[in-house]
Image (cartoon, helix red, strand yellow):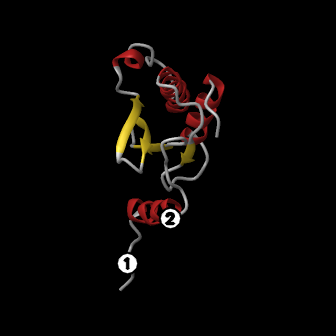
Amino acid sequence: MIKTVDRNVARKVRHMRLRKKIKGTENRPRLNVYKSLKHTYVQIINDEAGHTLVSASTLDPELRDKLGGKTKKEAARMVGDLVAKRALEKGIKKVVFDRGGYVYHGRVQEVAAGAREAGLEF
């Protein structure tokens, strides 16, 4: 009997493999990306303390009004921009990018581009 591969399980395996190498510290927290079928979520996390420092998503009231008629890639870039602005307000300038087991393409790439344009370094 052939087992079907669950795409999300395979993604979680890739993510855990990445997490062995990527750690968020106080000086350089981890920028994590998660995407569902409709929305994109981004968090900046200090793994040493286990705290989420900043978060943003396409569900935020700031963005929700502006997303009408936008594609998911355009929305992801706006989320990256928003999380970078919030991080800069809290004094976070450098982060480690965690793509969450996803391929660095499409929405994940747009989040990174939006965050870089807004001033985050990674």
Q: Amino acid at mark 1?
A: Lys
Determine whether the residue tagged by mark 2 lies in a helix, strand or loop: loop
Q: Which mark is residue 3?
A: 1
Q: Which mark is residue 20?
A: 2
Q: Amino acid at mark 2?
A: Lys
Label 2 and label 1: CA atoms lie apart by: 27 Å
Residue located 57% across and 53% down the image: 103
Quadrant location, the C terminus: top right
Determine whether the residue tagged by mark 1 lies in a helix, strand or loop: loop
Q: Position of residue 70 (x, y in %)?
A: 50, 22
| Residue 29 higher or lower than 71, as above or below | below
Point out the frontmost of discs 2 and 1. Answer: 2
Q: Position of residue 22 (x, y in %)?
A: 53, 56
Q: Quadrant of residue 60?
A: top left
Q: Nearer the viewer, residue 97 or 110?
A: 97
Q: Which mark is residue 80?
A: none
Q: How many residues crowd around disc 1 within 10 Å: few (fewer than 14), some, or many (20 or more)? A: few
